[in-house]
């Protein structure tokens, strides 16, 4: 039986919620449903994922009954070239939903949300020809395996456990639904909001771009959503950097 109030959720949004006690991956299920013609805004929820993953195939831990693991299926009405912006928009939606609890989250470009330097949420945006699978893994309750101690945190550990998981989900989906519609003409306003929450700005970072390992000072986020890094006399615009690590001063 679902731990969520699905009647409340379906009544609020008027779309079908697909709930699973256990599934391989909510993004994979979104792809299956998307290919079958599932509607824009459909939400795939799982209590437990056996093959949850992040960017570049990295695994994603979300403890049973302790997190939100879901994917929103989108069929954007704006051009495909703008779809990559959804990663930043999703991070902003998560941050705003957390701020309502009195917490101070930061966005680690392009797809993580941090509190106090520790990861509280991961985002994975994947696309096919006519739809997007926007996956979110948000740590609500505590309890992490030893290898994640000191790297991950949860809303409960940070003092933000006043909501039920259904209430967390409603707040987050509300933000996602509202902000994803503004990816086109309203993107400069969204980008400004992301920039004020960027965890990397003015930090010395090490990152990987393609096969290169690079180091420089982050200058923020560019007008297209790319990461700006000063490497010597060159300002590098990174659209697909990964394994980003802040160098302690």
Image: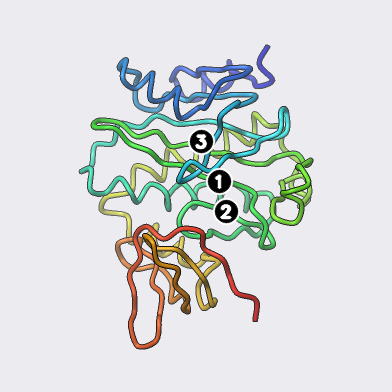
The furthest residue to the left? 79
Few, some or many C-alpha atoms within 10 Å of disc 1 (few <14, some 14-19, many ≥20)?
many
Expressed as whole percent of the image width and height from the top left, the position of residue 247 reads 60, 74
- As drawn, 159 above or below 189: above
Say which mark, if any, is on residue 113.
Answer: 2
Quadrant of image for the N terminus: top right
Among the two numbered marks 1 and 3 on one chain, the one whose residue lies closer to the N terminus = 1
* Residue that badge 1 annotates: 122
- As drawn, 223 above or below 148: below
Say which mark, if any, is on residue 3.
Answer: none
The answer to whether the residue labelled 1 contacts the one labelled 2, judged by CB atoms less than 8 Å apart, is yes
Of residues 20 and 247, the one drawn nearer to the viewer in this rendering: 247
**Is label 3 or label 2 in front?**
2
The quadrant holding residue 188 is bottom left
- What residue lies at 51% left-to-right and 70% top-to-bottom? 206
The furthest residue to the top? 1
- What residue lies at 58% left-to-right and 32% top-to-bottom? 69
The furthest residue to the bottom? 233
- What residue lies at 63% left-to-right and 50% top-to-bottom? 100
Say which mark, if any, is on residue 173.
Answer: 3
Q: CA distance from mark 3 to mark 2?
A: 16 Å
Question: Callout 2: helix, strand or loop?
Answer: strand
**Is label 1 or label 3 in front?**
1
The furthest residue to the front? 211
């Amino acid at each position: 039986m679902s731990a969520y109030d699905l009647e409340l959720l379906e009544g609020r949004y008027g779309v079908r919620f697909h709930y699973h006690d256990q599934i391989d991956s909510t993004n994979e299920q979104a792809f299956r449903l998307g290919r079958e013609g599932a509607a824009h805004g459909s939400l795939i929820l799982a209590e437990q994922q056996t093959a949850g993953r992040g960017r570049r195939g990295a695994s994603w831990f979300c403890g049973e009954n302790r997190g939100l693991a879901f994917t929103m299926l989108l069929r954007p009405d704006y051009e495909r070239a703008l779809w990559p912006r959804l990663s930043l928009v999703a991070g902003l939606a998560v941050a705003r939903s957390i701020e309502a609890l009195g917490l101070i989250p930061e966005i680690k470009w392009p797809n993580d949300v941090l509190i106090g330097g520790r990861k509280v949420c991961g985002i994975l945006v994947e696309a096919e020809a006519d739809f997007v699978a926007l996956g979110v893994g948000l740590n609500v309750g505590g309890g992490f395996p030893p290898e994640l101690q000191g790297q991950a945190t949860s809303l409960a550990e940070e003092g933000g456990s006043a909501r039920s998981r259904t209430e967390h989900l409603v707040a987050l989906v509300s933000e996602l639904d509202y902000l994803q519609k503004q990816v086109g003409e309203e993107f400069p306003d969204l980008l400004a909001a992301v920039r004020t929450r960027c965890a990397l700005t003015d930090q010395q970072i090490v990152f990987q771009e393609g096969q290169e390992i690079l180091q420089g000072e982050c200058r923020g986020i560019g007008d297209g959503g790319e990461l700006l890094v000063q490497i010597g006399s060159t300002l590098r615009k990174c659209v697909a950097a990964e394994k980003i690590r802040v160098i302690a001063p």
